[in-house]
Image (spheres, helix red, strand yellow):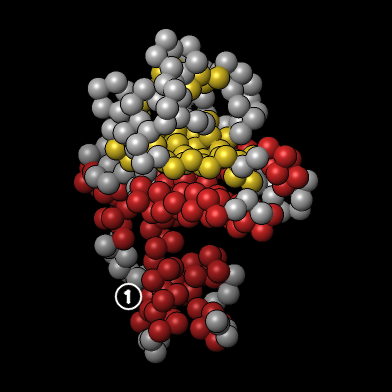
Amino acid sequence: MGPFLTERSPLARATGFQNQRLVVVPRPLIREALARPITQRLVVTDAGVFPTARQHGRHRPHGANETIVILCVAGTGWVETGNSRFEVRKSTAVVLPGGTGQAHSYGASSEDPWTIWWCHVRGSDAAELIEESGVSSECPLIPLVAVDRLTAMLDEIITALEQDQSPARLVATAGMAWRLLTSLAVDRRLPEQGSPLQQAMKFLEDRVDGSIRLPDLARVVGVSSSQLSKLFREATGGGVLAHHTALKMARARLLLDTTDLTIAEVGREVGLNDQFYFSRQFRRMHGVSPSAYRAERKG
């Protein structure tokens, strides 16, 4: 990535940023890592943190071989990819898939320069991990639910690589990067605080022992039934009823594992008063009856 402004700008920066951290793994070591069993799947090639990165930016007319992950924790910046330009605000990730050959540019805003934590990764698994996060050239941004947790992961990566870039260290940081990328995929699917989807999920979570019709829930959160169904399908892969049923079954598992309630009583605790209907729903999800689940040895 490097602490320099975009190559097309007349304001190229020749120095780094105050209190920056920057680690670049030598390319011969990367080539060796990509030939070893674990790091051929994922390896961190570069990582760093640039505080208040005034005049920072990059323009790559043919993209990069590495997948680029940038976490904006303060200030603002921008990214251009495809034919679109996006503003990047605090608590947002930018993910630019590697090996696409597609031009991209990004940089700090002049008014309020961003502070960013970042890393570059390569490997055979990188594309699938990025695909799981749902980003594309049409939408390279991910709103972050817990940015501090993600920056802590990048801090681990940078600290490890600052010590050395031995094969063992590259394996360790590969695991850290895997966790980072899967966390980004999860954040992509988690609803933003206060959004209709988040409100609906919270409403259902608080009413595991009850029931509600889709139109009524949609009315509570202020969207149409069709829109709410679409939001749930995109976030969970299923509908509202399926999500509420999954919450009920999760509570039922907890009660079966931690209490002496009868099967009928567990069913009533999750709003399914018909014991036989509860047992059918439980078996459909878990492949065994509630009594068989309770008898299983766990842990």
Q: Position of residue 104 (x, y in %)?
A: 52, 20
Q: Does residue 267 lie above or below 44 as drawn?
A: below
The answer to whether 229 appears left or right of 33 in the picture is left
Q: Position of residue 224 (x, y in %)?
A: 29, 36
Q: Does residue 257 lie above or below 88 as drawn?
A: below
Q: Is residue 107 visible?
A: no
Q: Position of residue 117 (x, y in %)?
A: 42, 41
The answer to whether 264 appears left or right of 180 in the picture is left
Residue drawn at point x = 37 percent, y = 33 percent: 17
The answer to whether 227 appears left or right of 292 in the picture is left
Q: Is residue 290 visible?
A: yes
Residue drawn at point x = 28 percent, y = 55 percent: 202
Secondary structure under tag 1 reads helix
Residue at image mark 1 = 269
Q: Which of the two residues, 200 or 146, is positioned nearer the viewer here? A: 146
Q: Residue furthest bottom?
A: 260
Q: Mark 1 Cα within 10 Å, few/some/many (few <14, many 20+)?
A: some
Q: Which of the two residues, 14 or 140, is positioned nearer the viewer here? A: 14
Residue drawn at point x = 27 percent, y = 46 percent: 193
Residue drawn at point x = 38 percent, y = 58 percent: 244
Q: How many marks?
A: 1
Q: Position of residue 119 (x, y in %)?
A: 51, 40
Q: State the quadrant of the C terminus.
A: bottom right
Q: Which of the two residues, 121 or 203, is positioned nearer the viewer here? A: 121
Amino acid under label 1? Glu
